[in-house]
Amino acid sequence: MLKKLFHGMLIYAVGDMVVTGVTGFILLPVYTKFLSKAGYATYSIVMTNTTLMTFICHFGITSAFSRLYFEYSRQNKTNDYLSTIFIGHNTYSLVLFLLFFLFGEPFWQLISPQTAAFPFLPIALALAFFSFIPGLFSLLLRIQEKAHLFVVFQLVSVILIVCSTFYSLVYMQGNIETMLSNLVVANSFIWFISVILISRRFRFTVKFNYILNTLNFAWPILLSYLAYFLLNKYGLIFLQRYETLEQLSYYTFAQQVSLILIIAGNSFGKVVQPMIYSQESINLTHLKKIIFYYRILLSFIALALMASAGPIIELLGSSKYQKSKYIFFIFIAANYIYLFPLIESFILMYYKRSKQIMFTTMGGALLTSIVGMYYIPSYGILAGAVALLVGNLFIAIVNIYTTKKILHKEHLQ
């Protein structure tokens, strides 16, 4: 079991590092060299808003799909289910795109007062739309445990993204608008490739009971994602009212680099998640071993990142971003706390406690907002990072306690 876990984790870590690592870390020196600090801060703000648009566009459907797929698989109805999701979601997302394009400018200005709605709002909407089908296809590969194909697909995706970025910033010497516009083109190609690959299983059918089952499972996940967005990005949203773009660049740079820990933790999770969801019942002995090995590995990586913070920042952002070092430490601690109960969150999803996750995440987001609102005006970016840590700590404590309570109850029956 242990060998399978680490082998799978390594493959998924490579796949994730190929996309998130290259676009989020390896391209950081390109961003910091060819964009000013204000330009990099603007890029981070636009991508933050794109994340919000993505959550709204996806509606929690991919997470619901990953759980319900196994139920429909036992009934040999996965192709019908996949086709229903494909048609239903594309219809929903096109309507959503049109509504935001026509009426979304006041909302954009509310969350990003220092960044113009046009052309950035349509760009964020397009990136959100083109992310769903590729995300669904990569999820299918994980569910079917086709780890090597997952890496190949990620590799093709990242080649398109890297070529787009270098063409925009290095070859064309373009600005932030040029880079993001070409990024939309690259993502549209990835979307097209995904549609072709998924179409082999496509049937022109829509089962409304499948849609209702999925939405019933998905809406609490959507609210959890929105709360998660508020938890992680409230600091950046609120800081825009008090800090300059230069200060925001230190904050967003430190948060971006700290995602290395998130990638490592989630790579382990991508191996464990289908193993848990596919079981008829939870094996407590195996579960405890998985949690133990996961937390040992997570702790080692977190300590290693803190110990090498200076060289990492120098490598990815040059000496002009060394001021972000102490913020980086806080983000690593916050991410460690967030990842600590990752397996517990899978257990909650296994027992279909998505509403429990939703309310817990909303509680953490509310706590983060209160701490940030009170301290950011006085302490700036430092308070923004600490607020995230406090919110994550609340969520971790509640999820660990709740999971232990559920497992104790289930295994007494």
Image: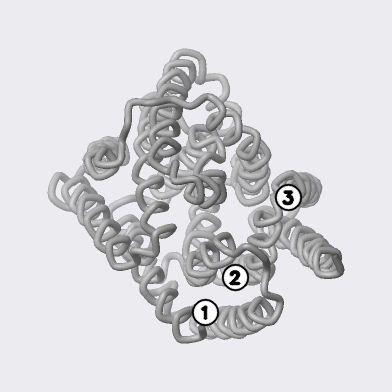
Q: Which mark is residue 332?
A: 2
User: Residue 75 location, x and y as percent?
Assistant: 50, 45
Which residue lies at the image location 67% right of the left edge and 49% below the top edge? Answer: 231
- Location of residue 155 by image quarter: bottom left
Residue furthest to the front: 75
Which residue lies at the image location 50% right of the left edge and 78% below the top edge? Answer: 309
Identity, as a three-letter code, of the amino acid under mark 3: Arg
Depicted 341 relative to depicted 249: above or below: below
The foreground one among 372 and 66 is: 66
Q: Which residue is mark 1?
A: 305
Identity, as a three-letter code, of the amino acid under mark 2: Ile
Depicted 313 relative to depicted 199: above or below: below
The reply to whether callout 1 and callout 2 are in contact (CB within 8 Å) is yes
Which residue lies at the image location 36% right of the left edge and 57% below the top edge? Answer: 141
Q: Within 10 angstroms of label 3, few (less than 14), some, or many (20 or more) residues?
A: some
Q: How is the image coloured?
A: one colour
Secondary element type, mark 2: helix
Secondary element type, mark 3: loop
Q: Which mark is in front, 3 or 2? A: 3
Depicted 27 relative to depicted 272: above or below: above
